[in-house]
Image: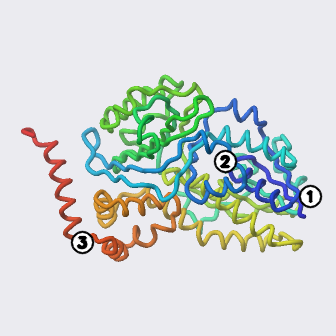
Amino acid sequence: MRSIGIVGAGQAGVVLAAALHRDGHQVTLYSDRTPEQYLAGRARPSACLFGDQVAYERKLGLDFWREQAPPITTARLDLGIAGRMVALSVNAPMRTPALAVDQRLKFAHGMRELALRGVRVVIETVTPQRLDEIAATHDLVVVTTGRQGPVGALFRPDRSRCSGAGPRRALFMMCLRDCGLDSGPQANELRFSFVPGVVEVFWIPFYDKDVGPCRNVLLEAVPGGPADRFAGVRGTGQAVAALRRVVRELLPWENEVLDPATPTSDQCWLTGAVSPTVREPVAVLPSGRHVLGLGDTVVLNDPIAGQGANNATRMARFFAQRITARGERPFDAAWLTEQFDQFWEYGRLVNEFSELLLEPLRDFQRDVMLAASRHPSIGTALFGGFEDPASVFPWFVDRRASKLFLAQHGVRPLDVLGTKLGVLGRVLSQRLPWA
C-alpha cells in the first residue's frame, strides 16, 4: 500500500482518489472547499461526460444521479446563417448515452462518499510552501487544482505541445429551466447550433443542483464578433437579456427554445475565456521534491469539444492504473514524465480535436456534414468524436481519408453534390425577394 496525496477535489481529484482507494492505497484528499461551500457556490462549467467516462464513474460508484439525470441519447447539429435560417441539420443517435451533472453536486457528494469509504479528507488552502510539506509525508502527491493560483503556476508551459496563443472564444454559460426542449424526445437531445465564424451554442440536457433536469447553455462567441456581448454583464437579469438578444438576432430558429426559459438560480451563469495550454506534468518544489499534475492543471482545452472533464477522467484512470502497477518502486520524476508521455499519445488527439472545432470548416469537412445530414450512421460517427476524439482521425482531418470514409458509407461525390444543391436552393429561396 502506498501513501498518495491528492490536492484538489475536482473531477480528476475525486476520480483518482476513488480509484486509488479501491486499489488499496492510503489516500488523502486536500480540498480548499467543504462540500457545503461547493453547494453554495456559483455554477461551474457544464462538464458533460461521454461514453467510457460515464461507465468509469459508474464502476467507481460515483454515479449518484444515474436515475435522476437525463441521459443524452441523441444529438442534433444545426448549421445556420446568421439572423436567417438553418441551412443544414444533422440528427443521429449517440453511440452510448452521455450525462451532464452539476459539478457542485458531484464534488460535494464525491468528497462525502470518499470520506465514508476511508479516504482522509483535509480542508485547507494549499500554498506552494505547504505543498512542499505535504510532499514530504506521502510517496506521491498529485496536483489537480486547475490552472489558476500559485500551485498551478508551479507547472511550466510546454510550448512543444501547445502554442499558448490565447483564447479563441469568449464564453458564456447559463442553466435554464422550462426550455422548449425539456419535454418529449428532445429532452434527451444534445443540440448544437452553429453560425460559422460567429458563434457556437450548445443546449445540453443537464441535472442542476437546484431544480433537477434542465438545460445547460454554453455559448462560444468569436472575440469581437456580433455574439461577443457578455464581458460587461452584471447580474442574472442582464445575462438572460444578453442571451435573448444574441439568439433573437443571430439564431432566430432557437427563439422557441429560449422564450419560455428562466434561470435556475441567481448563481447559475458564468462568463470568461480559456487559453488552451499544455504544461509539463512534473513540478519541482524548492526542497527538490516533485509532484505530478493532472487534469486542467496540465492540459487545458477550450470547452467547444466538451473534453475538460472527460480528459480529466481519462488521465485519472490512466495514472491510477500505472500507480498501482508500480508496486513499491519509487515514483521518480523521470518515470512520471514517461507515463505522461505515454498518455499524450492519446491526449494529443484530444487537443487536436478541440483545436479542430475552433477552425473554419474545410471543404471536405463540409462534405462530411452534408453526407451526415442524409446518413445517420455518419452523424453518429461524427458525434462519436465527443466520446472518443481519436475516432474521427484521420477521416475528418485528411481529404483523402475523408473521401474513403464516405465511400465506405455508400456516399458518392454526386450524392454530396445533390445535397449541396438542395441546401443552396433552400438558402436562395429565403433570400430572394419573391420567395
Disc 2 secondary structure class = loop
Residue drawn at (69%, 29%) of the image? 40
- Residue depicted at x 47% and y 44%: 188
- Please give left or right for residue 278 compared with residue 406 in the image: right
Q: Earlier in the sequence, mark 1 or mark 2?
A: 2
Q: Is residue 67 left or right of residue 294?
A: left
List the residue tagged with mark 1: 136
Residue receiving disc 2: 63
Question: Between marks 1 and 2, how big is the CA–CA gap?
Answer: 34 Å
* Residue tagged 3: 412
353 or 198, nearer to the observer? 353
The percent coordinates of residue 238 (x first, y second) are: 47, 25
Q: Is residue 191 left or right of residue 277?
A: left
Q: Amino acid at mark 1?
A: Ala
Badge 3: how crowded within 10 Å, few (<14), some, or many (20+)? some
- Residue type at mark 2 is Asp
Q: Amino acid at mark 3?
A: Arg
- Number of other residues with Cα within 10 Å of mark 1, as a class: few under 14, some 14 to 19, many 20 or more: few
* Residue 201 vertical position relative to residue 132 in the rendered view, above or below: above
